[in-house]
Structure formats: C-alpha cells, structure tokens
Image (spheres, rainbow, N blue to C red):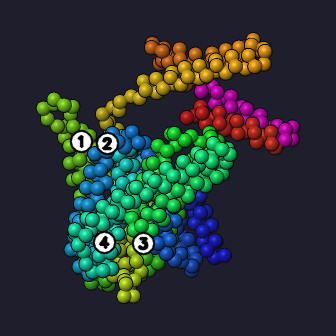
Amino acid sequence: METVSIILFLLLAVVVSGAVARMLPFGVPTPLVQIVLGAAIGLSTSHRVELDPELFMFLFLPPLLFFDGWRIPKDELFKDLSTVVELALGLVLLTVIGMGLLIHWMIPAMPLAVAFALAAVISPTDPIAVSAIAARVPIPKRMMHILEGESLLNDASGLVCLRFAVAAALTGSFSAGQAALTFLWVAGAGLAIGVLVTLAASRAKAWVTRRWGEDTGSQILVSLLIPFGSYLLAEHFHASGILAAVAAGVTMTFAEISRQAMAVTRMRRNSVWDTLQFALNGVIFVLLGEQLPGIVAGAKQTVLLTGHASPWWLAVYVVGIVAGLAALRFAWVWTSLRLTILRKREGAAAMRSPNWRLVAATSFAGVRGAITLAGVLTLPLVLRDGTPFPARDLAIFLAAGVIIVSLVIASIALPILLKGLVLPPEPSRQAEEDSARVATAEAAIRAVERHQHALGEAHGDPDLYAAAGARVMGFYRERIEGLGDGVAGEARAQERLASELRLVGIQAERARLLELGRARAIGSETARKLTRELDLAETRHRG
C-alpha cells in the first residue's frame, strides 16, 4: 500500500507541475518545477523511494526511446543524418573520453572506470527538456529535428558506453579489441532484434485483423508491449536492449505505412502514448527531486571521497563538469556545422563561418535530463566481491548536479540566443502537400464514381445514387480546383478563414449542447456522441 501511495504522489506531482509551470511568469521549464516538487515530497515524508537499477532502466527507458524513434520525422532525420551521426556518435565518444579523463583528473579518488561511466551517462541530451525551455521562444524546426535525432541515437550510444565502463569497473580490466567486437554484437544484434520484433508483431496484428476484425484496445496494448519485448529479447541474447527499443520505434513508422490501423485506433493510441510519455518523463524528474534531499544530506560524507572536507567542493566539481561539457560541445558543434549544414552549394569558393549564436544555441541546447538520471541510477550497488561500488553516491550527486545546472543555464541562455535568430529558409513542402491532396482527391472521385454506379445498378434507382455521388465528388473537385495554379494561395486563405469561422460555430454548438445537457433535454449518450463529433471537428480545424 505504501508503494501505491508513493506512485500516486509522484503522478500527482507530475500533474501539478504542468499547471505550476504555466502559472509562473518567467517561463520556468517544467522539468525544474518537477524537480522542486519532488524535493518537496522527499522533505515532507520520511519514506524514500528505493530504486532498483535494473527495474528502473526496464520500466522507463524502453517506452521513452521507442516513442522517440516512432515519432521523429524520418525525412528530416535522414536529410541531416551526417550531422546527427557526428553529434550522436562522435561527440559522445569525445565526451566519454575527454570528460572521463577530466573527471578523473579533478577527482583522483574516483576510479578511472567510474569516471568514464559518469562521463557516459552525462553524454546523452534531452530534447524534451529543451522543448520545455524554448516554449516561449520556439527552436527553429531544423535545429529541433537535429537535436531530436541526436538525442535518439546518443541515448543508445551513451548507455552502451556506460555498459562497457561498468563492466571494466566490475572486472578491473578493459580490452579495446574485445570491446570493439562486443560493441559490434551488442549494437548489430540489438538493432536487428528491434526491427524483427516490430515486423513480427505488425504482421501478426495485420493477420488477426484481416480474419477477425480489429480491436482497438488490443492494438494499443500490443504497441505498448513491443518496446518491452524488444528490450527483454535483446538483453536475453546479451545485446543492447536500448538500441532494440530505438530500432523498434523507427521500424514502427514504416510497418504502419503498409498495415494501417483504424482511425479511432490511431487517435486513441496517440493519446495513450502522449500521456505515457508525459507521465514517465515527469516521474523521472520528480524522482530526481525526491532523491535530492538524501543525496544532499549525504554530501558531507560524499565529499570525503574526494579528499576534501567542505561540501562546496562538490559544487565546484559540478560547475567544472558543466563547463567541460559546454566547451567540448561548442567546439564539436562549430566544426560540425561548418562542415555540413552551412556548407555552400557545389561550386562555391569557400565555406561560410557558422553564426556564433547558432553554435551557442545548439551547444546550450545539450541539456541533460531523464536519460542521464536513469543511466546513473543503474550503476551497480556492489562489486562482484560484495564490496560497495566505488564512488557511486558521488557519481549520482554529480550527475544530478549536471542535470539541474544545465537546465538552469539553458533556461536563461536559450531564449536570449534564439530571440531573433534567423536561419536559412527551409524549402517549402507546400507543392508536395498540394500534389498529394490532388492525387488523393482524384483517387476518391474514381472510387466514389465506381461505387455509385454499382449501388445504382444493384438497387434500381440510379438517380438517387447519382445525386449523392455528385455531391461527394463535388467536394473533391472543389479541392482539386482550389489547388490549381494561380488560385492555390487564395484557396488556402479562404480555407483558413473558413476554419476560423467553423471554430466559432463549434464553440457555439458546445455552449448550446451544454445547456441542453444541463436541462436534461438530451440523454448522456447523445451528449457524449455529439461532444466527440465536435472534438474531432475542432481538432481538424485547429490542426
């Protein structure tokens, strides 16, 4: 019962944090509010959440990474794939090596393997925290796509590096050749298992649906089970469960293209996943806050591991680590942007230097968050001989400090750097969208015409079906004509105005429906049905 109560308090804190973040006048990021609320929970109760590292990793990481891989725009990811790979793999390796050596140099008492493990867990970035920070000053789309792609891959690469570092700490030895071979198996097998599990589950769902119909609840539940199944199967074969979850999410996009679910299933499934992502990310930050009182309370003992007596040395180390991370990221981002995104077209004589504000914004956007906390909490409690894992509490304290400091710095710096920042214009996809709308409208006209004739011949009343068909086909012909050359802009302006007027009408419908419901002039089932129709209409016109 105590465990259930703690879970409910954590979820309540997540709910409250969203409202509080919106109330605060200066755009305080939601993750910071969640950390503060978690700390309040930790201070107000004598109970502490004892986190099992393996269970924590299993419950939180697979669904979060799966959903990130599922929702990320694939075209944008592939367009800037070279930049994403440079950030997600090259920068992670540089961070692990460079920061591992820096941390060991600053804190000689921390074993080198543990320093590398800490460097590995602070290497992944968190785009969700960045999105919350930049809510009032939106991040340019292309930059956000690059950050999302980087986060998707560096979560996996950072945690794989963590795995090697922990193994070195447990065994006391490290072989570069053996690590390379192990990495190939861990990465390759993990990716393959994620792809195969998703394809197998999608084919099985499609086979059952074709024969016995589709059940919305079962479809949603299967999508929730796929990341956990991929993770467990990969771990069973000593591969990367993290990469398996990422690969499963990316594959899900392509599997859905050929095996479409019902519209109601997709809508409900999206709602479930959005809620799950919000809850899991929120709970992780609340848990960080809940652990802070205990971590800070043990700061006096933790600092003794470093050879100092004053707890202020821990703050010095946190600032030093954050500064090192920022310097490495700034140098790497400047080089990456100079060699890729801002390269002039073929035939240009030279490359332009990237705008320093763009480099700085991309650098400060490397906020650490949920994955860093999840990773550091998975450090083993004991070594193989039963002795405590060296400097585990110190690593957790430093990782928590890096998360908080990076969030605070980014929340101050990003809005300043992004304000008025002008990037090269993105190529318009309007022509592609218009072409797709015309093609689908033409296909609809042909299908309606065939079905109309078939109904007329079968029921012996062609005029009735011809009139109904003409009405529907007229809607599609208006769309085609409105997207023609010379009138597309005017048609879109009229459509925007029509959507605005339609929303006004929907609000009036809602008010009147509420009056009828309160007066008991209609039943609850009728009110529910009409409310759902209005919800769908409003979603369409606001989209």
Observer able to see residue 215 = yes
Determine the residue positioned at 35% across, 32% down: 426
Tell me the CA gap for discs 4 and 2.
30 Å
**Contact check, label 3 and label 1, Cβ < 8 Å:** no
Marker disc for residue 80: 2
- Tell me what residue is drawn at x 24 percent, y 74 percent: 174
The amino acid beneath tag 1 is Thr
- Side of 200 where 265 appears, left or right: right
Q: Which residue is mark 1?
A: 340
Q: Quadrant of residue 95?
A: bottom left
The mark found on residue 359 in the picture is none
Q: Which residue is mark 3?
A: 378
Q: Residue furthest left?
A: 349
Label 2 to label 1, Cα distance in Å? Answer: 8 Å
Instruction: State whether residue 507 is above or below residue 469.
Output: below
Q: Position of residue 102 (x, y in %)?
A: 22, 69
Q: Residue at x 45, y 14 (%)?
A: 485
Q: Residue at x 82, y 37 (%)?
A: 516
Q: What segment is highlighted magenta in the picture?
A: 497-523
Per the image, the residue denoted by label 4 is 165
Report x, y in % for residue 416.
35, 47
Do callouts 2 and 1 mark residues in contact (Cβ within 8 Å)? yes
Secondary structure beneath disc 3? loop
What whole-number distance in Å separates the C-alpha atoms at marks 4 and 1? Answer: 31 Å
- Give the quadrant of the C terminus: top right
What SS does tag 2 mark?
loop
Amino acid type, label 3: Thr
Q: Label 2 crowding class (10 Å Cα cut-off): few <14, some 14-19, many 20+?
A: some
Q: Give the SS element for disc 4.
A: helix
In the rendered view, does 334 fall on the left or right side of 257?
Answer: left
Who comes first in sequence, dot 2 or dot 1? 2
